[in-house]
Amino acid sequence: MLLAERRSLIIQELQENKKVLVSELSRKFDVSEETIRRDLDRLSEEGIVVKGYGGAVLKEQFGMELPFNVRYKMNPEGKMRIAELAAGQIANGDYIFLDASSTTVYLSRTLRQKSFEKLTVITNSIENTVTLAPAAGCEIVLTGGTVHSQTMSLMGSKAVDSVYGYHVDKALLSCNGLDITRGITEGNDEVVSMKQAIIKAADKVVLLADSDKFGRSSFSQVCDISAVNTLITNMKPSEEWIEKLAEMNIELIYPTD
């Protein structure tokens, strides 16, 4: 197992259980306890965990928002499948908004390989901007705001206000958690404000959520599931989810092969 993959799995364990033990991780990943301690040292340096005797806990003020470079490496195959399906939702001449999630960066990589006569992309994501800059026929509009280095995005009141000045055909965005009762959730209020503005600016809202997000509830609610028009995921959800989405007339797209 690669180092980055093991650390991503440690983070997933922290998200689910809020704490980890060195001894348990050592057995789970079949590596030495010293190796796990080094992994936790690195995560501590990145501000994700607080180390304690024999293990670590998720940093309280960190909540559920992970640094972009960590999120990008989590479930890459799933995000790529979602990106391939989401690209089929975008037509020539569209005005779209891409949020600053790691999943939309996979989508940007897919769109870069396609040919558009004209595609206008509005985003607060620095990574999306860099990824799509070489794409033929793609016009990129970057929102204003303050650079948030951890998420590689533009945030703050100026960023949110600028979004309210736009109208797009489609908004494609991801989330931290997707719960049947609480809806779409995120790790902090600043991200929530941005996503709420993005949703209001769009005629159609396309949620990109890999299977790890289902059943997860984070700190702040963005909106009810009913605000979504189309949900794209990387595998078939449970029957409970399928029935719920059908009841709400939400289009569900997932790989069938």
Image (cartoon, rainbow, N blue to C red):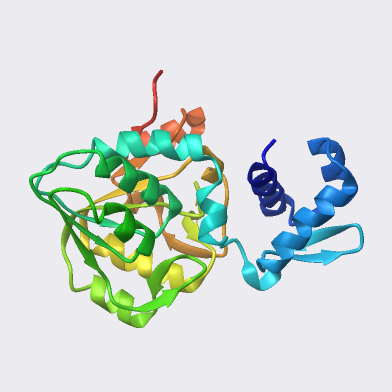
Question: x and y percent of residue 115 in the render?
Answer: 15, 39
Question: x and y percent of residue 90 in the render?
Answer: 20, 42
Quadrant, the C terminus:
top left
Q: Nearer the viewer, residue 152 or 210?
A: 152
Q: Please give the name of the residue rendered at 48% of the width and 31% of the height, measured from the top-left corner.
A: 237
Count of numbered badges drawn on the protein: 0
Q: Please give the name of the residue rendered at 50% of the width and 61% of the height, measured from the top-left corner.
A: 186
Q: Quadrant of residue 39?
A: bottom right
Q: Is residue 251 visible?
A: no
Quadrant, the N terminus:
top right
Q: Please give the name of the residue rendered at 91% of the width and 57% of the height, measured from the top-left corner.
A: 54
Question: x and y percent of residue 109 in the render?
Answer: 33, 44
Q: Is residue 200 visible?
A: yes
Residue furthest out toward the front:
134
Q: Is residue 196 above or below residue 184?
A: below
Q: Quadrant of residue 100?
A: bottom left
Residue 185 left/right relative to 129? right
Question: x and y percent of residue 246 in the render?
Answer: 35, 34
Q: Is residue 19 above or below residue 188?
A: above
Q: Is residue 206 above or below residue 252?
A: below
Residue 16 left/right relative to 91? right
Residue furthest out toward the top:
257
Q: Nearer the viewer, residue 110 or 179?
A: 110
Q: Is residue 164 above or below residue 49?
A: below
Q: Quadrant of residue 232?
A: top left
